[in-house]
Amino acid sequence: MPASTDITPRASYPAQLLAVSGRALAQLVRAPSHSRRAMAARTLARHSLWLSAAGAAVIIVLMVAFDLTEIQLMPARGTPSLWPIRILTDFGKDEYVLSVLGGALVVLALVAAGLHGPRRTLLLGLGTRLQFVFLSVALSVFVTEILKYLIGRGRPFVGGTANPFNFIPFEGTGAYASLPSGHAVTAFALAFAVSALWPRLRVFMFTYAIVILLTRLVLLAHHPSDVVAGALVGMVGAMAVRYWFAARRLAFVIRADGTIVALPGTVSGRLKRVARGASAP
């Protein structure tokens, strides 16, 4: 008797791609289900409040006592020897970072749609983590654009003088979009998000973020208080997205004390534990 074969027709590739994409998006908007989400929300609110209060105090001190001195010490804008800094600073540009992350998500979905079983599950687990990183940066950048428009702080030497108190709210041009620094927002949101998922990368990621921050100062694109504000917005934004994922049991777990940590072990290790649990009697 010939061995039986699975003759059940599989869905077409476009249908598989649509299904994979739909599930990836649906998981982000499903109702929160974690039993400790209220405790995590209180912890997030407390940490965000303290971080914001401390950050605001530092921003005010810098604005009053240090911004003017710092920008006067920097090389003139357009100095030819600064070309390596101009290249380096683009690694913190939100359009580039979001394009890379978005492209990675698209490629992952295209590959996962052609796979089945554990290999697809593994890729979708990685995709959830990439969604978290992408949304951490995207939300932070969105909030930043609103703040830039509302605050309308002039960049260093805009108007012809070194005036750190040059504000025209609702002005809406790049010359008056200094606070907060968009590059600092992107770099610190990215650093926080990646470090939250893979703590071993924390030193590398925050070193990258600080380097991006310093390039904005050297290029006279921002005042010191601008980049500190950007770091604050980026981290608080990523913290909020982390809570959103944890409340839906995506990529993170909530401990008994309300703190949020990444799912233990590697993605493949997690999948093995899920498979064993599903097959247990």
Image (cartoon, helix red, strand yellow):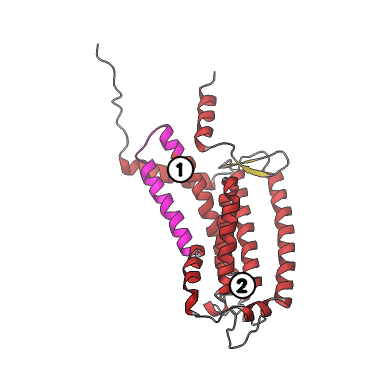
Across and down, in percent, residue 245 comes to: 58, 46
Visible in this render: residue 259? yes
Across and down, in percent, residue 120 comes to: 41, 37
First of labels 2, 1 by sequence position: 1
For discs 2 and 1, the disc positioned in front in the rendered view: 2
Quarter assignment of residue 62:
bottom right
- Residue at 56% across, 50% down: 194
- Residue at 42% across, 46% down: 21
Residue on which the image places disc 2: 179
Image quarter in which the C terminus is found: top right
Q: Is residue 223 above or below residue 253?
A: below
Quarter assignment of residue 191:
bottom right
Q: Dot 2: few (<14), some (14–19), or many (≥20) neighbours within 10 Å? A: many
Q: From which residue to which does the magenta span run? A: 95-122
Furthest residue to the top?
1
Furthest residue to the bottom?
160
Q: Total marks drawn?
A: 2
Which dot marks residue 23?
A: 1
Q: Nearer the viewer, residue 26 or 66?
A: 66
Across and down, in percent, residue 11 comes to: 32, 36
Image quarter in which the N terminus is found: top left
Most frequent secondary structure within the magenta stretch = helix
C-alpha span from label 2 to label 1: 38 Å
**As drawn, is 193 to the left or to the right of 104?**
right
